[in-house]
Amino acid sequence: MDVIVVNRFRVPAEQQEQFRGDLQRARETLAERPGFTHSAVGRNTDDPELWVLTTEWESVGAYRRALSAYDVKLTAVPVLGRAVDEPSAYELVEPGTDLNVAQFRSTGAPSIG
């Protein structure tokens, strides 16, 4: 299942030049990871302090594995940590595709009532 990751950032005007460079380095580092397919950087036309990084991955697993890579932790994670706190991974919705089933996801043991 293909995944789109949308990270939005609120960046004050005086920090934008530095942020733009940091975001580009993060984008390049993510692009080197297995499962990466595409990315784009944008800035809102009505609110220039609002930026977005979108990345596309072959699967949610590829994205999550990318985040655990050492070079990504050094370069991209500090930038991604500045993102607006909201869910960021989206499944692609195409006509006729089965959608993900809403369910609790945990790597730990299930809780007992």
Image (tube, grey):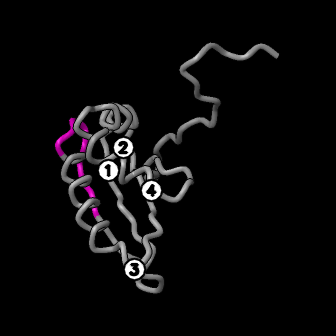
Q: Say left or right for 72 vs 13.
A: left
Are discs 1 and 3 less than 8 Å apart at CB? no
Q: How many marks?
A: 4
The residues colored magenta run: 32-40
Q: Which secondary structure, mark 4?
A: loop
The amino acid type, in three-letter code, at marker 1 is Glu
User: Which percent across, then down, holds residue 29?
Assistant: 20, 47
Return the residue at label 4. Answer: 82
Q: Which secondary structure, mark 3?
A: helix
If you read the primary sequence from the N terminus, does the residue marked by circle 2 or circle 3 appear first?
A: 2
Are discs 2 and 1 less than 8 Å apart at CB? yes
Q: How many angstroms separate mark 1 from mark 3 (CA)? A: 28 Å
Return the residue at label 3. Answer: 13
Disc marking residue 2: 2
The amino acid type, in three-letter code, at marker 2 is Asp
If you read the primary sequence from the N terminus, does the residue marked by circle 4 or circle 1 appear first?
A: 1
Instruction: Give above or below for 43 relative to 54.
Output: below
Residue at image x 39%, y 45%?
3
Q: Which secondary structure, mark 2?
A: loop
Q: Classify the position of the C terminus by image quarter.
A: top right
If you read the primary sequence from the N terminus, does the residue marked by circle 4 or circle 3 appear first?
A: 3
User: Which percent across, then down, holds residue 8?
Assistant: 45, 62
Q: How many angstroms separate mark 4 from mark 1 (CA)? A: 19 Å
Task: Depth check: give the residue in front, 21 or 7.
Answer: 21
Q: Residues within 10 Å of mark 1 (few under 14, many from 20)?
A: many
The amino acid type, in three-letter code, at marker 3 is Ala
